[in-house]
Image (cartoon, helix red, strand yellow):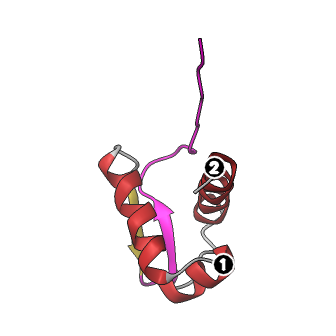
Amino acid sequence: MPLDKYLNILKAIDFWISNIKTGTAKEFAKRLNISERRLHDYLSYLREMGVPIEYCHAQRSYRYTSPGNLYIKIYFQ
C-alpha cells in the first residue's frame, strides 16, 4: 500500500476515535472504506505500538483510554 494512503487511513482512524464517533467495527470499517479485518489489523498494530485504544459498548465507539492523539513523524536523511 502506498505510504500516503496508509497515513491517511491512520489520520482518519485518529479523527474518529478522538471524537468517539466510530460506531461498531463494521460501521467504522465502512467509514474508512476498508474491510473489517483490515480495521482490526490497524487497531492491533496501533495497540502494539502502545496506543491505548478500547471499544466502549456504552458509547458504541472505539476510544482512547487516556488523553492524547496519534502523532506521526517521518524522518529522512
Residue 33 circle label: 1
Q: Position of residue 60 (x, y in %)?
A: 51, 83
The amino acid pointed to by label 2 is: Leu
In this view, the residue farthest toward the left is: 48
Is 67 in front, or is 62? 62
* 69 falls in the magenta region: yes
Left or right of 43, for residue 71: right
Q: Which residues are magenta?
A: 57-77
Q: Residue furthest top?
A: 77
Q: Secondary structure at mark 2?
A: helix
CA distance separating discs 2 and 1: 14 Å
Could you say which disc has been placed on residue 9 in the image? none
Amino acid at the residue labelled 1: Asn
- Considering the image in quadrants, where does the C terminus appear? top right
Q: Kindly identify the residue that appears in the image at 42 percent across and 79 percent down.
A: 37
> Which quadrant of the structure image shows residue 15?
bottom right
Residue at figure coordinates x 58%, y 63% from the top left:
17
Q: Are marks 2 and 1 in contact (CB under 8 Å)?
A: no
Which picture quadrant has residue 50? Answer: top left
Comparing 17 with 75, the one in front is 75
State the predominant SS element of the stretch in magenta.
Answer: loop
* Residue 19 picture location, percent across and down: 66, 63
Indicate the quadrant containing the N terminus: top left, top right, bottom left or bottom right.
bottom right
Q: Which residue is mark 2?
A: 7
Residue extending farthest front: 1
The location of residue 70, given as percent across then percent down, is 56, 44
State the residue at coordinates (51%, 46%).
Answer: 67
In this view, the residue in front, 33 or 55, is 33
- Circle 2 packing at 10 Å, graded few (<14), some (14-19), many (20+), is few
